[in-house]
Image (cartoon, rainbow, N blue to C red):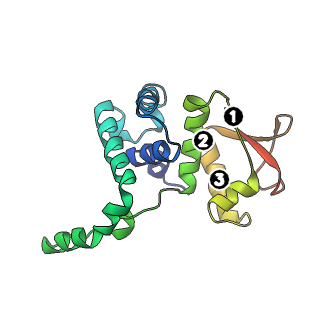
Amino acid sequence: MIKLDELYYDSFDFACIIHSQDIGIRTASIMLEKVWKQDNLYLNPYYRTNLRDLYLDVHYWLDYLCDKPVIDKEFPSIQKDFMSFGKEVNERAFITDYFDVDLFFKMKRLQIIYLNKQDYVRMKLRTLLKTYGYKRRTQEFLKYFRECMMFYHMQIYLCGNEKCDIGEIGLDDMITIRVI
């Protein structure tokens, strides 16, 4: 079962999407405001009432992602500082590559609703699996995929707008993802 708090958009998710898609700052700001106004239920509850904090935190993470290699090299020094105060910092939380499967759905939802001129995204199923290190569909992956599709109100189709299930189509089938 997926934890809902993992599926909500947070500032790091927005920063990853903006950074990976090379979205300009003006477009990013417009998108953030639209999401805050129109898709508020998908936002982390912390940001639902404070657009300013959302902007500030997204820009904080964008700065991190732009200078990630330099900042990651400083991790041992930061860890020593934390230890001197009797605290620990989780390396995985600090040094991260930002693409997880749930980020895929967040990104596609934003692209379809706010960024693209098209109301869909097309790709091969094999490409989707390969992006996240899968060669085949496991039951765990299928369950997670279906739960994310339901949460984000998305549906996949084959050619001719034929609804399909991710577990029943071929790996080389071209799928169309739409927000319903």
Sooner in the amino-acid sequence: mark 2 or mark 1: 2
Q: CB atoms at circles 2 and 1 under 8 Å apart?
A: no
| Residue hosting label 3 | 145
* Of labels 2 and 3, the one closer to you: 2
Identified at 36% across, 34% down, the residue is 48
* Secondary structure state at the residue bearing disc 2: helix
> Local crowd at mark 2 within 10 Å, few (<14), some, or many (≥20)?
many
The picture quadrant where one finds residue 177 is: top right
Q: In the displayed structure, would residue 41 be above or below residue 139?
A: above
Residue 120: numbered disc: 1
Instruction: Report, in whole angstroms, how far the alpha carbon at label 2 lies from the one at label 3.
Output: 13 Å
Q: Are marks 2 and 3 in contact (CB under 8 Å)?
A: no
The residue at which mark 2 appears reads as 108
Check disc 1 and give the amino acid type: Tyr
Q: Which badge, 2 or 3, is on the more N-terminal residue?
A: 2
Q: CA distance from mark 3 to mark 1?
A: 17 Å
Asked which secondary structure carries label 3, the reply is helix
> Could you say whether the residue bearing mark 1 is in a helix, strand or loop?
loop
